[in-house]
Image (cartoon, helix red, strand yellow):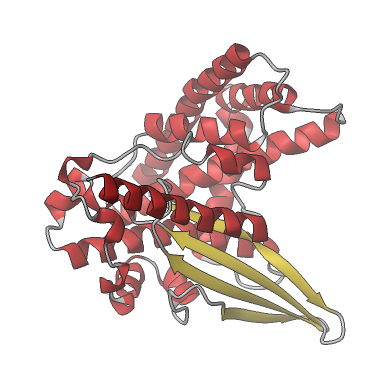
Amino acid sequence: MQEFRARKALMKQKNSLQVYEELDKLSSIYFPTPYFAQFFSLVSFPSPDCSLSPPGLLYLDLNIYREYMIKALIKEQNEDLYQLIKRVAFDGKYYRIKCVHSGEWEYCWDLAVRIQFFGMMQGLAFEPKKIISRKDKKIIYTSLILINPYELWERKLVEKLWNLQDRIEFLIAKILFHECIHILIFLGKTLPLGFKQTDIFLEFKEVLVFANSEKLCPESSDVQSHLWNLVNLGSKSPESSKKKLDQVSELYEFLINEKYSIKKTDLAFGFPWSNRKISQNYAKIAALKLGFHIESDKKLWKKEVNKLHKDLEKLYDRIDNNHKSKSKIN
């Protein structure tokens, strides 16, 4: 038993180190500060019901999944997301997914997908590294998606899919679907003007416009007010008001992005998250993205995060109600 525990601890440490190495190489869209790395276990997604988990879970061979089945599951739900990963093998290597021309310049996007166990985060979409070749008049963006199917033994998923191969393919497809939404939104914001946008980006843009409109007051104002307070608590040095406002705006868009992506994934694959669950998790993540100033009052910081969680849930409810109202009209 002691030998098994030692092997298990060693495997867990190895998986964690692999993730930290990736964080050192790339900056994440959702975890851009190195400071966040130490909080992986602190703000990870809720732990699954492990009562069905076998002792050898860490040694499960992930290669039992079939790529074509995962891609078929995604294609069944959304053609744009399927086109994004159509030519990408899940081996961690970069594959060219898109090239467009704008004037004398060519814009290219490369994507890598890697599947591995690493702690208790479902997935990570890393912000693309930008490579500029003035000689070739080419700008290349390289993105990495990490998929962690650690919830394989979550009770509801096991009850729905008893076959392990079907279950792992379904879970990988669900996580990849979510992370690819983030990539498509980033590409939509980066594409040169005049090029056709995906339905996902246009839909998200519409949600973001509503989230920033006067119609969503006072909920949006309350959330941004808490973000402003957290920016001040997490600041280690005097910063301009403009820089702080930019941070608040960036975090607010991040929270809307996650709400949209989770909702879109839930509609496609089921196993929905409540707004309470989403707001509870992402209020903490948003706060930790800012870092925590050691001289700040920890109780005050936690109190502000709790307030953000409650008002964020109200904001998400209003967004859902607006979506339901539009659906009834249509």
Q: Where is residue 175 in the image (x, y as percent from the top left)?
A: 39, 57
**165 relative to 291 in the view: left or right:** left
| Relative to 226, 91 lies left or right | left
Give the camera-side residue of 15 and 233: 15
Question: What x and y, as percent, mark residue 314?
Answer: 46, 25
Task: Estimate the x, y position of residue 172 in percent, counting from the top left.
Answer: 34, 62
Q: In which quarter of the image is the N terminus?
A: top left
Residue with the most extreme bottom position = 136
Instruction: Give the residue displayed 44% in from the left and 39% down from the top.
Output: 44
Question: Is residue 243 visible to the viewer in this orientation of the structure?
Answer: yes
Q: Which residue is pictured at 43% across the width and 56% down the height?
A: 178
Please tell me which residue is depicted at 41% across the width and 72% down the height of the picture. 79
Going by the image, does 314 lie left or right of 328? right
Q: Please determine whether, in this image, residue 99 is positioned above or below residue 216.
A: below
Q: In this view, does 47 lie above or below 110?
A: above
Please provide percent x and percent y for residue 136. 82, 87
- Asked whether 311 or 24 is in front, the reply is 24
Location of residue 225 with respect to 84 vertically, above or below: above
- Left or right of 42? Residue 28 is right
Closer to the camera in the image, 14 or 48:
14
| Any part of residue 26 in sight | no
Q: Which of the two residues, 208 or 116, is positioned nearer the viewer here? A: 116
